[in-house]
Image (cartoon, coloured by chain):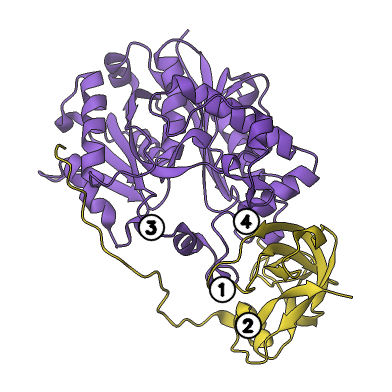
Chain colours: A purple, B yellow
Amino acid sequence: MRDVAVVAWAQSPCRAANRRDDMAGILLPVIRETVNTVGIDRDDVDFVASGSHDFYEGRTFSYIDSLDAVGAWPPISESHVESDAAWALAEAWSWLQLGEGDIALVYGIGRGSLPADLDQVMPAQLDPYYLAPLAPHRDAIAGLQARSTIEAGLTSEQGMAEVASRCLASALDNPLAQRSEQVDAAQLLEAPYVSSPLREHDVAPVGDAAAVVILAAGDAARRLAERPAWLRGVDHRMDTHYPGVRDLSESPSTGRAAHRAAELAGFSASDVDVAELHTEYSHQEAILSGALGLKGAAVNPSGGPLAGRPATATGLIRVGEAARHILDGRADRTLAHATSGPALQQNLVCLLEGDG
Amino acid sequence: MTGTAESLSAPYTVEFPFERTVGPTIGTFLGGLRDGQLYGVRTERGVLCPPLEFEPGTGAETGELVPVADTGTVTSWTWVPSREGDPVPHDFAWALIAIDGTIGALFHAVDVDGDSGRMTTGMRVRARWRTERVGQLSDIECFEVTS
């Protein structure tokens, strides 16, 4: 295996809605920031991978717009995943393993604010025969999962409110967060349900933002960053799609991805200081912490997705945040988790490490 | 980017404007709905409802389709406000319903006359069938409490 590291990362502020900029307009300053951080020219980038969803934009091949911010002439080597950009990072990591280049740029861009009614759009990710025709509310399957998680004894409405309270307080130190405040769990519990047992604070707020990670292999990484955040293990797995045949209080695919990532890394999730988890809902922190086997790690010190969930950039932001602790020399081993699909159907785990 | 002009936007409609052949497993299930009959599929672990083409645990191909009851037990539920296009005209629950004699659970709506206090995990429910059925999930209007 080649050593591959995150050498730079940046994101735009998470906004509930950005009606001023198009995809390229949101993305361009973020690409400039990362490229300037490592002092390279865009011609030095060997591969570009991105993640976005057409169904937010409402047209096919919508991501082509965002390539204006990359500069695709003369022709470049690039790829796109119709998913969270954490999966684009997995593709770029694999591409660098092939040894055909040394530097890859990964970006995620999404404008979750564009649909007039997300309840009309989110069923597009569901089985077209058994689920989509029923057009369940956007949070309904997560609501079922939250109740299963509570009834399995893994959390409670109080516990979920405490997770949200902690994340919103952590986000006070994150100027790019969409939401942040000092608020008691008791106060949060006074709010009505949106899809019981979920209240508004339990649901990560969808919005608009872009995130960019620059990966580099071997000596290129050592040249570009003082302390590269080495991606020691990367793996992603998925569970069956239909929620009725899964135990929703568990995430076996997260466990399998973590196990494989640990085999690659030589250390496991129980060894990390910081874990950035793609919790689209507060109850998922309990499921993921258990499936990963975290022991004493700080979970989502950035505030996590409960403080801002830009469509298809949120998982890549977890990787960037986990890398930042190593790049800044504040942690030696960190973990990033990303998810896609309903109720944690697909999961990706990265184990990162800095040189001693 | 400078300036204050908002980016262009346009309305669009989400649709699935295709006809597909769904195959023998899902096809039998959807045909059963049209006839007012639920089907499950035999697997090594028991009869799975709704039927899938492959056993989710092992990937093994599933077997024969068999008729099953239209009653079951709620294994999880979430209470939501009724919106246009929903199967129930007042607030209701989306639920997972373990159909009697089967493994797995069916995702569908449960109507308790808008009273969330009547919803419990473990409650017994029965399908309320539409009189006009066309071979899709909405041939079951919703599930209701068995008396």
C-alpha span from label 4 to label 3: 20 Å
Percent coordinates x, y for residue A274 in the rendering? 55, 21
| Badge 4 and badge 2 in a common chain | no
**In the image, which is nearer the foreground, mark 4 or mark 1?**
4
Q: Amino acid at mark 4?
A: Ile
Q: Is residue B33 left or right of residue B9?
A: right
Q: Is residue A78 left or right of residue A326?
A: left
Residue B58 visible in the current orientation:
no
Q: Which is nearer the eye, A187 or A123?
A: A187
Secondary element at tag 4? helix
Distance, label 2 to label 3, CA atoms, is: 31 Å
- Nearer to us in this view, A346 or A193: A193
Q: Which residue is mark 4?
A: A141
Quick one: label 3, few (<14), some, or many (20+) residues within 10 Å?
some
Picture coordinates of residue B129, whole percent (x, y): 71, 84
The amino acid type found where label 3 is placed reads Pro
Of all chains, the one bearing label 1 is A
Q: Which mark is residue A115?
A: 3
Marks 2 & 3 on one chain: no
Q: How many dots with numbers? A: 4
Q: Chain of mark 3?
A: A
Task: Give above or below for A41 relative to B17.
Answer: above
* Front position among marks 3 and 1: 3
Q: Which mark is residue B30?
A: 2
Q: Residue at x 54, y 80 (%)?
A: B22
Residue B10 % position (x, y): 26, 63
**Helix, strand or loop for disc 3:** loop
Which numbered dot is residue A56?
Answer: none
Circle 1: residue type: Tyr
Marks 3 and 1 share the same chain: yes
